Amino acid sequence: MTSESTSPPVVPPLHSPKSPVWPTFPFHREGSRVWERGGVSPRDLPSPLPTKRTRTYSATARASAGPVFKGVCKQFSRAQGHGFITPENGSEDIFVHVSDIEGEYVPVEGDEVTYKMCPIPPKNQKFQAVEVVLTQLAPHTPHETWSGQVVGS
């Protein structure tokens, strides 16, 4: 019997990349001076409005536990990703973000909706509609699904 000693294979050490890999658009590191240099145009700034993905858990829980309101879609722009709802009680129009629309149809003017309300930070003085559900589609109006198919006429 021969006994040969085997050594473990030589593995090269891991090295970090020369430059750190950080997402730079549209989010910059805190304390970055890029805003003062004019390297970012106003359209590149991140939106201060909370979307379904950026809303805090506590704000989502409070909105979900709140009452359900009824209203009519005043205007909605799929290209811009937001619109407004006129509440049934006639108060000030409510902002709605595309991420808060539930269902398969893109809202159009005249659609009846139900929704819950969530305050908009940082001052929490205004509200936006969340958990928006289309309850009655506007009659004699073509509606588009999120996949782009046009339904009705």
Image (cartoon, rainbow, N blue to C red):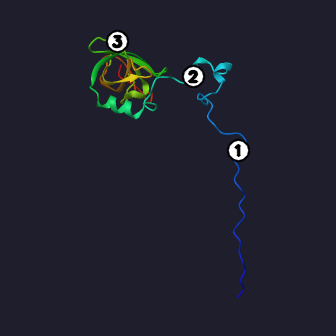
Give the residue number, with chain letter if any, for mark 3: 92
- Secondary structure, mark 3, is loop
Q: Secondary structure at mark 1?
A: loop
Decide: few, some or many residues near mark 1? Use Cα within 10 Å; few <14, some 14-19, many ≥20.
Answer: few
In the displayed structure, 89 sits above or below 52; it is above
Residue pointed to by mark 1: 17
Q: Earlier in the sequence, mark 1 or mark 3?
A: 1
CA–CA distance in space, label 2 to label 1: 28 Å
Q: Amino acid at mark 3?
A: Glu
Q: Is residue 83 left or right of residue 37?
A: left
Q: In the picture, residue 42 is in which quadrant?
A: top right
The residue type indicated by label 2 comes to Leu
Pinpoint residue 77: horizontal percent, then vertical percent: 45, 18
Q: Position of residue 93 (x, y in %)?
A: 36, 13
Viewport quadrant of the C terminus? top left
Mark 2 in CB contact with mark 3 (< 8 angstroms):
no
Identify the mark nearer the N-term, 2 or 1: 1
What amino acid does circle 1 point to?
A: Pro
Question: Which label sits on residue 27?
Answer: none
Who's the residue at 71% across and 71% down the image?
7
* Mark 2 crowdedness (10 Å alpha carbons): few <14, some 14-19, many ≥20: few
Q: Alpha carbon of mark 1 to alpha carbon of mark 3: how far?
A: 53 Å
Residue 50 lies left or right of residue 153; in this view the side is: right
Does the CB distance between marks 2 and 1 fall below 8 Å? no
* Residue 145 image point, x, y percent: 40, 27
Q: Mark 2 falls on what kind of element?
A: loop
Q: Earlier in the sequence, mark 2 or mark 3?
A: 2
Instruction: Please indicate whether residue 82 sits to the left or right of residue 37 in the image.
Output: left
Residue at image coords 34%, 33%: 61
Q: Going by the image, does 130 lie left or right of 70?
A: right
Q: Residue at x 42, y 19 (%)?
A: 123
What residue is pinned by disc 2?
45
